[in-house]
Image (cartoon, rainbow, N blue to C red):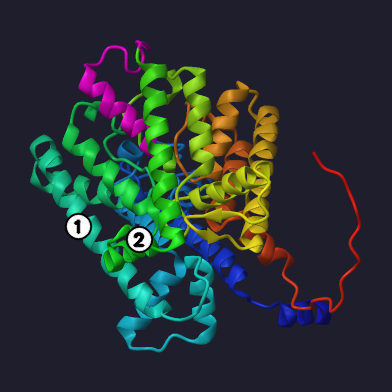
Amino acid sequence: MDYIRRKILKFDLNPPRVLVLGFLALILIGGILLSIPLATSYGRETSFLDALFTSASASCVTGLVVVNTADHWSIFGQAIILLLIQIGGLGIMTMATIVSLIAGKKISLKERLIIKEQMNQETLSGLVKLIRYVIFLTFAIEAIGAISLAFSFIPLYGVKKGIWFSVFHSISAFCNAGFDITGNSLMSFTNSYLTISTLSILIIVGGIGFAVILDIGKNRKWSRLGLHTKLVLTISLGLLLVGTLFFFILEYSNPDTLGQMSFIDKVFAAIFASVVPRTAGFNSIDVSLMRESSAFLTIILMFIGGSPGSTAGGIKTVTFGVILISTISIIRGKRDTEAFKKTINPEIISKSLAIVTAGMGLVILIAFVLTITEGENFLDVLFESASAFATVGLSRGLTPDLSEIGKIIIMLTMYAGRVGPLTMAFAIGYNKKHRRYRYSEGHISVG
């Protein structure tokens, strides 16, 4: 007992550990609330594993579901899911800061360190001010999105239900969660240009990151924008255009997806198919009926995901951009990695490489394990694995049929994807002691 007590006392709640444990607590609380009869539409308990899976998916803003959100959950259950999405999208410390600000409490240094870790910021200065902006921007954008969606949903579902649908899907889209309460995602809204456009904008804005939005609002001119903002905008736009073009070409004649649509519907569907893998999880066409080439392209886009400091998952656009630019620089024989007349710190390149390696390793490992536990087609399993890691929520039909072991594996993958593989590693392997010496360099050959 004394040994255990000493270990507990020595346990250091560093920022990564606080975030890891905070999300874990949120998932457990959500699972308990969703397992009670009041949370279901038919008044019976949901199995704790299914409730926990739904809670993990909502808290990690993923969107993978083992039960139909529209049919299975009551208004209370859907409200719990929406609250988990909002907290998971903004982050544990953002919500805790809201409570502290309302109560008039000061934000401690340790809390600032945790916020810095959560928001992917380099310095401690201006963090509380940033949180205020984040809160205001989030609620303002979600409100505008809900108003826009109301023009589509109220005529279809009536005032009361239409408003609820508008609020739910606006928050779900901005937080890049992908949960829907229409019953079939957005496949019945393919020709509703207002709905598709609104949700696309919400997903994109939520996925570029709060720091980027603030930088654009403050500086406005391209020449004044920071390197981070320029990289985010350039890479995000490039991926969106490339994805749209390839989806349009690959699925143009597929009778199960775009083949039967009008030309303008095909364009909107292709754009939306390129937007949602940025970790949103909605779909206006059945991804299980996509051609394998399109499914593989979706996996790549999901793995890259959104941008740092946003509500999105994946390895992040800037991480992908840094690796790409660094590779091009090495091929060209350049000593430094440069972008927009700025040199990228070698430590950032090393961190980016670690994130890509850890992310790719996790996705491949989970896909391998799922082929054993589920016995499904490898492409479908890889798709599910990438979707869970990148907190996307798209599935080729595997999620509802997962075994109990499969559900646990996907839950853990969503959890690791939301908090980040490096944050998980720092939380587990954190050590305050650092060596004061370095070994001499040794020569090795690569490539």
- What's the magenta region? 253-276
Write the residue at 75% across / 73% down: 431
Confirm whether the magenta stretch covers residue 260. yes
Q: Is residue 138 left or right of residue 381?
A: left
Q: Position of residue 96 (x, y in %)?
A: 41, 74
Q: Is residue 277 left or right of residue 132?
A: right
Which amino acid type is marked by label 1?
Ala
Residue at the spot of label 2: 223
Q: Position of residue 97 (x, y in %)?
A: 40, 77
Mark 1 or mark 2, whichever is nearer to me: 2
Which amino acid type is marked by label 2?
Ser
Q: 10 or 259, which is in the foreground? A: 259
Where disc 2 sits, the SS reads helix
Residue at the spot of label 1: 143
Mark with earlier residue (1, 2) = 1
Whether 253 is drawn above or below 170: the answer is above
Q: Position of residue 411 (x, y in %)?
A: 56, 46
Write the residue at 45% across / 71% down: 93
Q: Is residue 324 left or right of residue 143?
A: right
